[in-house]
Image (cartoon, grey):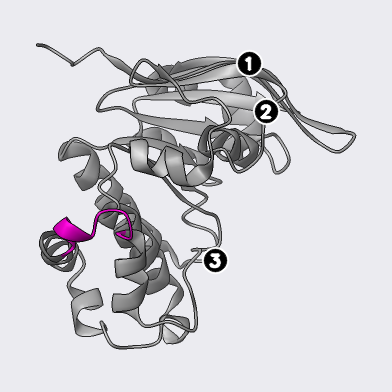
Amino acid sequence: MNRQNETILKVDDVYLSYGHVEALKGVSLEVKRGEIVVLVGANGAGKTSIMESILGVYQSRKGTVTFKDKNVTNLSADKIVRKGIYLVPEGRGVFASMTVIDNLLLGAHHNLKNAKAKLTYVYDLFPILSERRNQIAGTLSGGERQMLAIARALMSNPEMIMVDEPSIGLAPKIVSDIFKILKELNKEGYSILLSEQNVYKALKLSHRGYVLETGKVVLTGTSEELLINPEIRKAYLGA
């Protein structure tokens, strides 16, 4: 069966509120298997809210989320992870007081029988984590913590990874390294939904994008189309 154009994730008309604040106002988007899709928008546009609604961190009040043709709307985050979606949150999201190895094993808590093979895989991908396996995660550099957060996601054996603002606070060279890793993971077959403040770098990496303003999708297209769009260039690329 050719799954090249299969839609792995579909978000349809989702509304999400935090108290009286409406964070998402009828958002619809999709990710096809093997795609990198980027969410573009200013702080507060709704990028993180989309990821949190997909993962079930917050309950949407309307709309549906479908993953691999199954309705997963408002399931608990743990159940969503078991179905194959993992969120690498903004700010790295590692357990600072735990060792690198314990952080990784925590990512595999529902997949322990494959943990040894997955450890070998992530250590090959991130050799620095193998060297630092017994080091306390809070003592790692920002780039190393980001690598650990991505590696922990891979330990859960996901089919799709959501990565929220991976470049925040990192030096340009480290950002380039992280983006190379995401590109490599995509080549290996992982579908990726990315939120990123470095719009140019994110569009160069991704296949398609969605532009958000105040909880709504206002523009969508291929990354090439968005890169040459005058509004995008003016608002996000300084051109």
- Residue 169's label in the rendered image is 3
**Kind of residue at badge 3:** Gly
Q: Which residue is mark 1?
A: 63
Q: Secondary structure at mark 1?
A: strand
Residue appearing at x 41%, y 80% in the figure: 137
Query: Separation of disc 1 and disc 3 at Cα?
Result: 34 Å
Q: Quadrant of residue 52?
A: top right
Q: Report which quarter residue 56 is drawn in.
A: top right
- Please tell me which residue is depicted at 34% across the width and 25% down the height of the picture: 207
Residue 185: image location, x then y, percent? 22, 45
The boundaries of the magenta stretch are 108-115
Q: Position of residue 175 (x, y in %)?
A: 39, 59
Residue 8 in which image quadrant: top left
Query: What amino acid does circle 2 point to?
Result: Ser
| Residue 127 visible (yes or no) | yes
Q: Looking at numbered disc 1 in the image, what kind of residue is underneath it?
A: Gly
| Residue toward you, 186 or 105 | 105
On screen, residue 5 versus residue 25, left or right, reads left
- Which corner quadrant holds the C terminus? top right
Q: Is residue 120 above or below residue 88?
A: below
Mark 1 to mark 2 CA distance (whole Å): 7 Å
Task: Quickly name the residue at label 2.
Answer: 60
| Residue 218 screen position, x and y as percent | 65, 16
Callouts 1 and 2 close, C-beta under 8 Å: yes
- Rendered residue at 42%/79% (across/down): 141
* Crowd rating for badge 1 (residues with CA inside 10 Å; few <14, some 14–19, many 20+): some
